[in-house]
Amino acid sequence: MKKIAIIGGGISGLYFANILNNQKDFEYKIFEKKDNYNFLEGYGIQLSVNSIKLLNSIGFKNLPASEVSFPSKVNFIQANNSKKICDIDLTQFNDPLNRYTTLKRSTLLEFLFKNVPENQIKFNSNIKKIENANGFRITLDENKHEEFDYLIIADGIFSKTKSLIFNEVKNPKYNLNVALRGKLKGDYGSDISIYMGSNSHYVIYPVNQNNEYNFVAIIKKKLSSDELQNHDLFKSEEFLASLVSGLQKTSQISSKNLSELKSFPVYVSSKFISLNKKNIFLSGDALFAFPPSFAQGASQSIETANDILKSILSGTNEFYQERIRNISSINNKSKLNHFSFHLSNPINIFIRNKILKYLSKNETFLENYLGKIYRA
């Protein structure tokens, strides 16, 4: 019986635990630094067909339909006047059993958590040391030791575990943008809408069938090192209000219809850590964090976890390395999306909108740009 340590109980770690439940030759334990999960948070995520297919194989399709939404289009809108430029049909990437899905992140976490036996997740975990010889010896805060054959590192963008394992770890860089998240009151339809502004963009989409909507904005913002270290700054009402007022005014957004606002600086990775061993794997943001302009964070966390298991079962890193190549492609496309969503020069905006209108209906482009990621 092989033992697997999963460091981090986010989407990637919990999904990996779920698919291990069907593997009789492995046992696992999740080490989660938080003391519990908050299943009441309303912030949304988007899941493309690839990841939905994987989730459906472990029972996600049995979730009540009222808890998810199935957008059929992505609308591209000019933020300063709310005029629609064009749209992309998402249904072309669906199949009869799996559809592009939006939902609350907490809904997915709760579904995954329910399938993990209580004795296989340890909350309030503080890992002090990891010794790597033939396997892994993990030392916890209370000086207790546990040994494992495999190590899955999925503890987020500022992974503490990476610094315990690798000699040189490059910290992610602040990419001069702040994310603003919140719940949006009102009726904004059943599709995803991207509002492109000057040095900012925001996205609105439903998270269930109960007229609950997710709002997320990415806003260009230069911050000093001291400001980035000041966690209270991102919670202050004054700072949150300045971010809202900084968005181009439209009929869609105001302080009156936004609630539960949170902000945080956007950090991105610059390179992958080189792994030469077959018993250490990174997943989620611990593996690589890219700009949030392709809505692929959750999907790639799930797909990476699945490829890690395939690599373990096959005894090769082939599937894992292929996933890294896919993530590199997504990173490049995320950067391109971010650039095009934030244009401010009127001439550049005019050209972008013309190109968007053409490409949004070009089947060859859509298959190469989206299809190979959504349903590869």
Image (spheres, grey):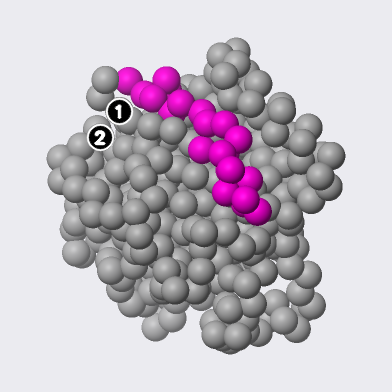
Q: Which residues are magenta?
A: 75-95
Q: Can residue 53 be seen at all in this image of the molecule?
A: yes
Quick check: marks 1 and 2 in contact, CB under 8 Å?
A: yes
Quarter of the N terminus within the rendering? top left
Label located before the other in sequence (1 or 2): 2
Residue identifier under label 2: 56
The amino acid sitting under disc 2 is Asn
**Element type at marker 1?**
loop
Where residue 264 sits in the image (x, y, percent)?
59, 70
Q: Is residue 290 left or right of residue 70?
A: right
| Residue drawn at (62%, 81%) of the image | 239
Q: Quadrant of residue 198?
A: bottom right
Image disc number at residue 98: 1
Where residue 200 sits in the image (x, y, percent)?
68, 56
User: From the viewer's perspective, is the residue at label 1 or at label 2 nearer?
Assistant: 1
| Residue drawn at (43%, 28%) of the image | 90
